[in-house]
Image (cartoon, rainbow, N blue to C red):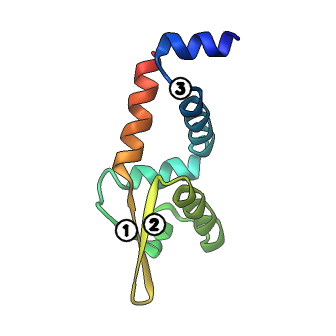
Amino acid sequence: MKKEKFCKKAHIKPGIIKRVKKLLTIIDNINRLRILSLFKKHKELSVCDILNSLKLRQNLGSYHLRVLRQAKLVSSEKRGSKIYYRENKKNIQEILKIINDLF
């Protein structure tokens, strides 16, 4: 009941609250935050660029990129033998707007 009242006061649907909670859990990891922060300076990066910039092992970096991709915070595109990533600005801005509206 309290949750429903809070959502009504904030004009946010409960489903959106659940999505934001899930996404906050996803970015509550230093490596995923570091990956996302790389996109402030770069429009897109190859997996090798990300791994080298952050000094991550391939298996660990691939795991975190997969989590971010599944959450639709980044998108990927294969070109030849390389995979390039870019942030999904629309989804990130949506999350930031919802969080801002809550406070």
In percent of width and height, residue 48 lies at: 46, 75
Q: Which mark is residue 13?
A: 3
Q: Quadrant of residue 3?
A: top right
In percent of width and height, residue 84 lies at: 40, 73
Residue placed at 58% from the left, 33% from the top? 15
At label 2, the amino acid type is: Ile
Residue corresponding to mark 1:
45
Mark before the other along the chain sequence, 1 or 2: 1
- How far apart, in angstroms, are the residues tagged by discs 3 and 2? 35 Å
Residue placed at 60% from the left, 58% from the top? 67
Q: Nearer the viewer, mark 1 or mark 3?
A: 3
State if disc 2 and disc 1 touch (CB < 8 Å).
yes
At label 3, the amino acid type is: Lys
Question: Which structural element holds mark 2?
Answer: helix
Residue corresponding to mark 2:
50
At label 1, the amino acid type is: Leu
Mark before the other along the chain sequence, 3 or 2: 3
Q: Quadrant of the N terminus?
A: top right
State if disc 3 and disc 1 touch (CB < 8 Å).
no
Q: Nearer the viewer, mark 3 or mark 2?
A: 3
Does residue 41 appear left or right of residue 54 in this picture?
A: left
